[in-house]
Amino acid sequence: MKKILMIATGGTIASRAGEDGLAPEMDSSGLLGRVPEICEFCRPDSVQIFNIDSTNITPDHWVKIAETIRDNYDAYDGFVVCHGTDTMAYTAAVLSYMIQRSPKPIVLTGSQKPIDKEDTDARINLRDSFLYASSENAADVVIVFQGKVIAGTRAKKIRTKSFNAFDSVDFPELARIRDGKIIPYIVTPKGDKPEFHLTLNRKVGLINLTPGMDSEILDVYFRYNDAVVLSGYGTGGIPEGDYYGFYEIIESWKNKGKTLVVTTQVQSEGSDMSIYRVGRGLKKRFSLLESYDMTYESILAKLMWILGQTKDEEEIRKLFYKSVNYDLIG
């Protein structure tokens, strides 16, 4: 049987109720003790690296998770990361860039209710995650949740309370798990060995445009960040004209080593700045990057990874448009 290491980080799955609400308290051995049946198909082990509400996650925590996987990579056949659901999609995305082409599966999971609740979804999510991590065709970074297997760069939390919390955005699920059986849809090619990239640049900011927004906010973001993601309307439209002044702000920061990415606020089908003048004019005038069908989480994570490796404009562009773990289809 395969050896699987569970890396516990906290989240709802490990939480208990207190005077101030739910907070993570249960440790990794307590979690494993709630799903003894996984010993029928794998040899589980566990480690607790921190115990936080995932709202409090930082890039330092991401590095700690990646380092733990790197340091234990040769000793185990797969990994299950127990994580809070609120930022799980961000962590799955960033791990997809920090640990690329992994022939061993790195599965993230959690729950919408604590594992010691009678009506919890935690036990089945944990069981499914260990089952998938033990399977022959599993590889790379995925989220396993409510029977869905989702590529790490394509997941988004779409429901705050329901058990069916995650969807795969603009890309098929990799598999479904039903009644203890894995139904594969897409088999991820396995790399020969993983590529670890543990340096992140956290100076990446996101601006979600609203009608009438003062363009000075963009100037502030450029001042404090190495990359700015500008989330426009529809297919990627950015307001033009003197009232807004976005073009002038972008012009003032041109050739100052900053990276600008334009995306859309619309969840599905991605951007296409070539359709309308409010997109085409901006892209034609400036050397910006367009996100197309990437998720918010993947855009931000990918920029942190890229800018942790290079400051060269052409290399940044090359890496941004390089497909990693199904993040960009084109």
Image (cartoon, rainbow, N blue to C red):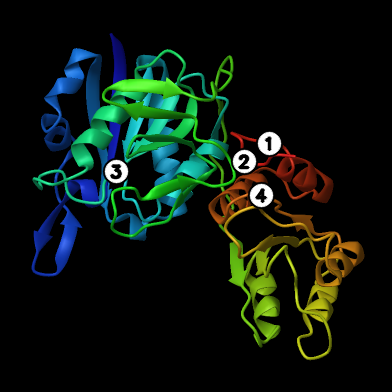
x then y, percent, for residue 215: 71, 83
Quadrant in which the C terminus appears: top right
| Residue 77 in the figure: left or right of residue 125 | right
Which residue is denoted by mark 1 in the rendering? 323
Give how far apart the Cα atoms at labels 3 and 2 are.
22 Å
The correct choice, above or below, for 287 with respect to 317 in the image is below
Per the image, label 1 sits on a secondary structure element best described as loop
The correct choice, above or below, for 299 with respect to 183 in the image is below
Which residue is denoted by mark 3 in the rendering? 110
Per the image, label 2 sits on a secondary structure element best described as loop
Label 3–label 2 contact, CB within 8 A: no
Per the image, label 4 sits on a secondary structure element best described as loop
Mark 4 surroundings within 10 Å by alpha-carbon count, few (fewer than 14), some (14 through 19), many (20 or more) = many
Q: Is residue 80 visible?
A: yes
| 309 or 107, nearer to the observer | 107
| Residue 7 in the figure: left or right of residue 247 | left
Which residue is denoted by mark 4 in the rendering? 293
Residue 231: quarter of image = bottom right
Residue 267: quarter of image = bottom right
Label 1–label 2 contact, CB within 8 A: yes
x then y, percent, for residue 93: 51, 44
Q: Residue furthest right?
A: 285
Of the numbered discs 4 and 2, the one sitting upstream in the chain is 4
x then y, percent, for residue 322: 72, 37
Of the numbered discs 1 and 4, the one sitting upstream in the chain is 4
Of the numbered discs 1 and 3, the one sitting upstream in the chain is 3
The type of residue carrying mark 1 is: Ser
x then y, percent, for residue 128: 29, 29
Residue for point 60% across, 62% down? 266
Q: Say which mark, if any, is on residue 327.
A: 2
Give how far apart the Cα atoms at labels 1 and 2 are.
6 Å
